[in-house]
């Protein structure tokens, strides 16, 4: 198989590297001094891919010595809370792509558990035959603790806001800063662990760390980045549906403007609920935006069923509408949105934050 441009460049520079250092010594240094746990297995599936090597970090993470691990299958690290929905995807992914990324729960020798992510890649000989698999693993325990701290601090922050909401009413700027901070924390907790390029670890943030469909990080699978231009090319929208949607979001925005300028009353809140319901109904024609449509629908139902009082959380309603409006305008009107799903994620996060105050 011919090299691509990037592979050819890598091959050339790697050749220069090994000309100055023994390949065996280079491999030894990489494995022994890696900060991540590394384990290498054979390619024999019938015997459970027996471990042939594990570095010191892996041994410390699992509680097993190297002598205990060699000859055993990595299955010894699995247990009742491991995510078998993820594990069963390893084989087909490796066969199709030659690598696999996933997360699950591992069991140490003493029976304790820890969340872990793995990157598994095949190792081939010069004839292209797969001889081994190498897995680089990262213990996510500290990340789990940080996620729990974010959740706890956000609860305290909400309680503080509720206790001092009258004070915040007198300072619009400060109130908006509090609202924005709460919504940002919700984004940190409720969306994805990493961005599309696996770069910014906290750009959108955390999955739940309980076992689930996607392992220790049990959240929804990240949607691939898609520009508004490409989205509309692939998914042409009927003119009547588009007109109805745009009219709905403009009507919601107008009603929110009246709420801010003329105050809150039951009729106005119910009007906003009806307009949001129309937005959700019109948005359901885009199956890719079901998450956004569902949260808007839920907000509409909650607004329509609640009793309006002086402590109504209107700043969060305004912030939610801003996310909805900016998202849908960027996709369907200006069509300059670089990632149509980013606005949807922001809408979902703001919606969850609003619902927390409406409960």
Image (cartoon, helix red, strand yellow):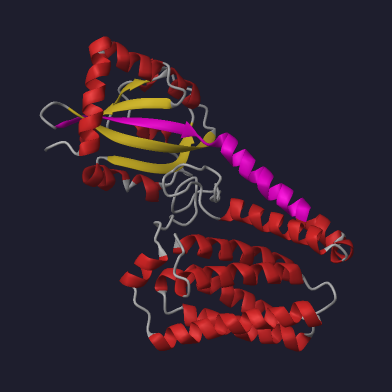
Residues 165 and 5: in front is 5
Residues 259 and 122: in front is 259
Residue 212 percent location from the top left of the image: 48, 52
- Quick check: 326 above or below 142? below
Magenta segment, which residues?
Answer: 129-157
Residue 279 percent location from the top left of the image: 54, 81
Residue 76 location, quadrant: top left
Question: Would you say 7 lies left or right of 243 here?
Answer: left
Residue 234 location, quadrant: bottom left
- Quick check: 73 above or below 265? above
Residue 155 percent location from the top left of the image: 74, 53
Residues 113 and 183: in front is 183
Is 188 one of the magenta-colored residues? no
Residue 135 visible here: yes
The quadrant of the picture occupied by the C terminus is: bottom right
Q: Residue at x 43, y 16 (%)?
A: 33
Residue 300 percent location from the top left of the image: 63, 79
Question: Would you say 257 lies left or right of 138 here?
Answer: right
Q: Residue at x 45, y 21 (%)?
A: 59
Q: Residue at x 60, y 75 (%)?
A: 298
- Quick check: 192 above or below 199? below
Question: Would you say 279 lies left or right of 238 here?
Answer: right
């Amino acid at each position: 198989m011919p090299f691509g441009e990037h592979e050819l460049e890598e091959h050339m520079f790697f050749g220069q590297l090994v000309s100055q250092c023994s390949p065996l010594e280079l491999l030894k240094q990489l494995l022994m001094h890696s900060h991540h746990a590394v384990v290498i297995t054979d390619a024999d599936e019938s015997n459970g891919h027996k471990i042939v090597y594990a570095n010191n970090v892996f041994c410390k993470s699992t509680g097993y010595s190297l002598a205990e691990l060699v000859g055993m299958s990595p299955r010894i690290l699995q247990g009742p809370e491991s995510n078998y929905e993820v594990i069963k995807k390893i084989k087909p992914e490796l066969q199709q792509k030659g690598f696999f990324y996933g997360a699950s729960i591992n069991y140490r020798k003493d029976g304790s558990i820890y969340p872990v992510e793995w990157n598994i890649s095949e190792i081939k000989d010069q004839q292209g035959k797969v001889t081994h698999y190498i897995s680089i693993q990262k213990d996510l325990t500290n990340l789990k603790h940080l996620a729990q701290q974010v959740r706890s601090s956000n609860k305290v922050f909400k309680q503080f806001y509720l206790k001092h909401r009258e004070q915040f009413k007198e300072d619009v700027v400060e109130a908006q800063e509090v609202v924005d901070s709460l919504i940002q924390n919700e984004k940190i907790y409720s969306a994805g662990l990493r961005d599309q390029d696996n770069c910014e670890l906290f750009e959108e943030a955390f999955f739940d760390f309980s076992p689930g469909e996607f392992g220790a990080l049990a959240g929804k699978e990240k949607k691939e980045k898609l520009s508004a231009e490409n989205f509309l090319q692939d998914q042409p929208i009927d003119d009547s549906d588009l007109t109805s949607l745009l009219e709905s979001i403009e009507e919601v925005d107008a009603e929110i403007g009246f709420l801010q300028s003329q105050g809150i009353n039951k009729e106005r809140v119910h009007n906003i609920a009806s307009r949001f319901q129309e937005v959700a109904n019109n948005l359901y024609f885009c199956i890719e935006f079901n998450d956004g449509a569902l949260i808007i629908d839920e907000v509409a139902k909650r607004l329509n069923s609640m009793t309006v009082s002086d402590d109504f959380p209107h700043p969060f309603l305004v912030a939610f509408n801003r996310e909805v409006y900016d998202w849908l305008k960027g996709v369907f009107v200006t069509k300059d949105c670089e990632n149509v799903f980013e606005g949807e994620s922001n809408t979902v996060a703001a919606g969850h934050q609003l619902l927390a105050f409406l409960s």
